[in-house]
Image (cartoon, grey):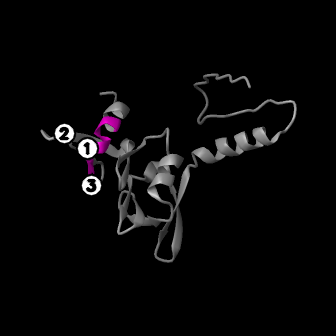
Amino acid sequence: MDVEIKIDPGLQKPRVIICTNALTAEITALAERLSADHPSMITAISGDRIYLLDKKEIFRFYTEEQKTFVRCAQQTYRVKLRLYALEEMLSGSSFVRISNSEIVNFGHVTSLDTSISGTISLRMTNGDKAYVSRRYVSKIKKYLGL
């Protein structure tokens, strides 16, 4: 399979075209994977309502009492997906796992505070604070290019 990448500054979002002589199971699986890898919406629940949240609105995902929550600017919702599934779904984006119980959208991080002990605390644009566990510090530094 040949892969070709073209840069077009006029495009609003990435566009993938698959050229093939026949529609095979491999091509079908590839098309499904490409379209499902980075959905722009996350399904969340609050009360008896289901909401579709744009990833740009999301500040962080976290677990509490074995339930997964998503925090936006003013509201917190429940999500049925586990953190490992969210991490896989959001890989390659601005979402980074910072502990066993939290994934943060670095698009909403305003500052990082480092301590002498080597831990990092993150300040979000909505005022929330999140703490990077020592196990994930090297991953965060790599993401930030430090």
**In the displayed structure, would residue 65 be above or below residue 88?**
below
Q: Is residue 69 left or right of residue 24?
A: left
Mark 1 or 2 closer to N-term? 2
**Is 131 colored magenta in this rendering?**
yes
Residue at the extreme right of the image, as rendered: 22
The residue that label 3 is drawn on is: 128
Measured as percent of width and height from the top left, residue 47 is found at: 46, 76
Tag of residue 118: 2
Tag of residue 134: 1
Q: Which residues are drawn in magenta? A: 130-139
Question: Under tag 3, what secondary structure?
Answer: loop
Provide the major secondary structure of the magenta segment. helix
- The answer for how far apart the CA atoms under marks 3 and 1 are is 20 Å
Quarter of the rendering containing residue 28: top right
Question: Under tag 1, what secondary structure?
Answer: helix
Could you tell me the amino acid type at mark 3? Answer: Asp
Q: Is residue 13 left or right of residue 31?
A: left
